[in-house]
Amino acid sequence: MRNTLTVNACPYCEGHGYVQLLLGGSETCYGCQGTGSEQEEDNEH
């Protein structure tokens, strides 16, 4: 069994770690929890 971890820029915040709100301001990205990267864990059997 092999585990690989792929790290890509988050598609929601484009790697910034936050999203701009329509009415102004910003909030922590819900896709990456503020890390700016999306982690996908692939488990191969």
Image (cartoon, helix red, strand yellow):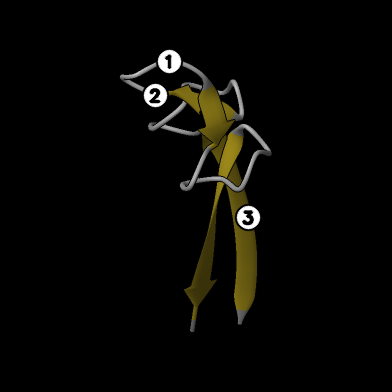
Provide the secondary structure element on which disc 3 rests.
Answer: strand
Label of residue 24 in the image = 1
Q: Amino acid at mark 2?
A: Leu
Q: Nearer the viewer, residue 6 or 16?
A: 16
Spatial CA distance of label 2 from label 1 is 5 Å
Provide the secondary structure element on which disc 2 rests.
Answer: loop
Spatial CA distance of label 1 from label 3 is 35 Å
Coordinates of residue 4 in the picture (x, y in percent)? 62, 60
- Asked if the residues shown at circle 2 and circle 1 are in contact, with their CB atoms under 8 angstroms apart, the answer is yes
- Asked if the residues shown at circle 1 and circle 3 are in contact, with their CB atoms under 8 angstroms apart, the answer is no
Q: Which residue does the image show at 56% across and 23% down from the upper left?
A: 15
Label of residue 21 in the image = 2
Where on the picture, by quarter, is residue 17?
top right
Query: Which residue of the protein is positioned furthest toward the left in this rendering?
Result: 22
Frontmost of labels 1 and 3 is 1
Quadrant in the picture for the N terminus: bottom right
Q: Is residue 16 above or below residue 10?
A: above
Q: Is residue 28 above or below residue 31?
A: above
Dot 3 or dot 2, earlier in sequence: 3
The residue singled out by tag 3 in the image is 5
Coordinates of residue 27 in the picture (x, y in percent)? 55, 33
Q: Nearer the viewer, residue 19 or 1?
A: 19
